[in-house]
Image (spheres, helix red, strand yellow):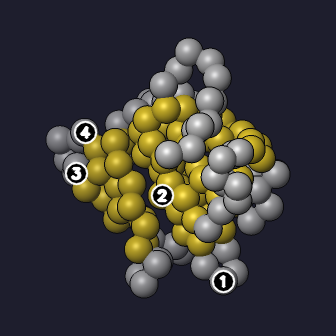
């Protein structure tokens, strides 16, 4: 095992996702983009802020896209999408107001995100592109 990465601060990291030599670390309301090309010396590329405490992260990394999906338990913007095709400058694509989300997964075959949360009407939601 390598020396690891210290994200700093007093907030624990709750979720992680990665693709190639890039790792996305959810710590508090921040998502940190970390280069792990050298696993013994991970380096921070950039950080972007979600609408609330990040509960889960999923990635969509195809030939023509690079998106990170996140979910929070916040009262607004619980589902969000960031374009990370340029990791140094992530851009918010959009967000949805859904009720208290805890998990997200992305299926590249169907191009759909699936989220789970706490809601008496629907604990499982499918999100499709328009």
Closest to the camera, between mark 4 and mark 2, is 2
Evaluate if marks 3 and 2 touch, with contact meaning CB atoms under 8 Å apart: no
Closest to the camera, between mark 1 and mark 4, is 1
Q: Nearer the viewer, residue 67 or 8?
A: 8
- Residue extending farthest to the left is 120
Instruction: Using the numbered discs, state the Cα–Cα distance from disc 3 to disc 2 in whole angstroms.
Output: 20 Å
Residue 8 in picture, x, y percent from top left: 64, 23
Q: Nearer the viewer, residue 105 or 97?
A: 105
Residue at x 50% of width, y 54% of height: 17
Q: Which mark is residue 54?
A: none
Closest to the camera, between mark 3 and mark 4, is 4
Q: Which mark is residue 58?
A: 2
For label 3, the SS is loop
Residue at x 41% of width, y 82% of height: 110
Q: Which mark is residue 118?
A: 4
Q: Is residue 93 left or right of residue 122?
A: right
Local crowd at mark 1 within 10 Å, few (<14), some, or many (≥20)? few
Local crowd at mark 2 within 10 Å, few (<14), some, or many (≥20)? many
Evaluate if marks 1 and 2 touch, with contact meaning CB atoms under 8 Å apart: no
Residue 99 in picture, x, y percent from top left: 35, 39
Instruction: Using the numbered discs, state the Cα–Cα distance from disc 1 to disc 2 in whole angstroms.
Output: 17 Å
- Can residue 95 be seen here? no
Q: Of callouts 3 and 2, which one flags the residue occurring earlier in the amino acid sequence?
A: 2
Residue 91 in picture, x, y percent from top left: 75, 53
Q: Of callouts 1 and 4, which one flags the residue occurring earlier in the amino acid sequence?
A: 1
Closest to the camera, between mark 3 and mark 2, is 2
Instruction: Using the numbered discs, state the Cα–Cα distance from disc 4 to disc 2 in whole angstroms.
Output: 19 Å
- Can residue 87 be seen here? yes
Q: In this figure, which residue is indicated by the disc labeled 3?
A: 122
């Amino acid at each position: 095992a390598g020396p690891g990465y210290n994200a700093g601060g007093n907030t624990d990291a709750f979720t992680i996702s990665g693709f190639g030599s890039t790792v996305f670390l959810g710590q508090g309301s921040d998502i940190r983009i970390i280069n792990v090309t050298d696993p013994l010396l991970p380096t921070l590329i950039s950080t972007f802020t979600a609408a609330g405490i990040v509960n889960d992260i999923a990635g969509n990394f195809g030939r023509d896209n690079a998106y990170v999906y996140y979910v929070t338990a916040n009262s607004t913007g619980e589902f969000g999408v960031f374009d990370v095709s340029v990791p140094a400058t992530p851009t918010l694509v959009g967000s949805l107001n859904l009720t208290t989300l805890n998990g997200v997964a992305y299926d590249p075959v169907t191009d759909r995100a699936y989220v789970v949360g706490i809601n008496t009407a629907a604990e499982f939601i499918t999100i499709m592109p328009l």
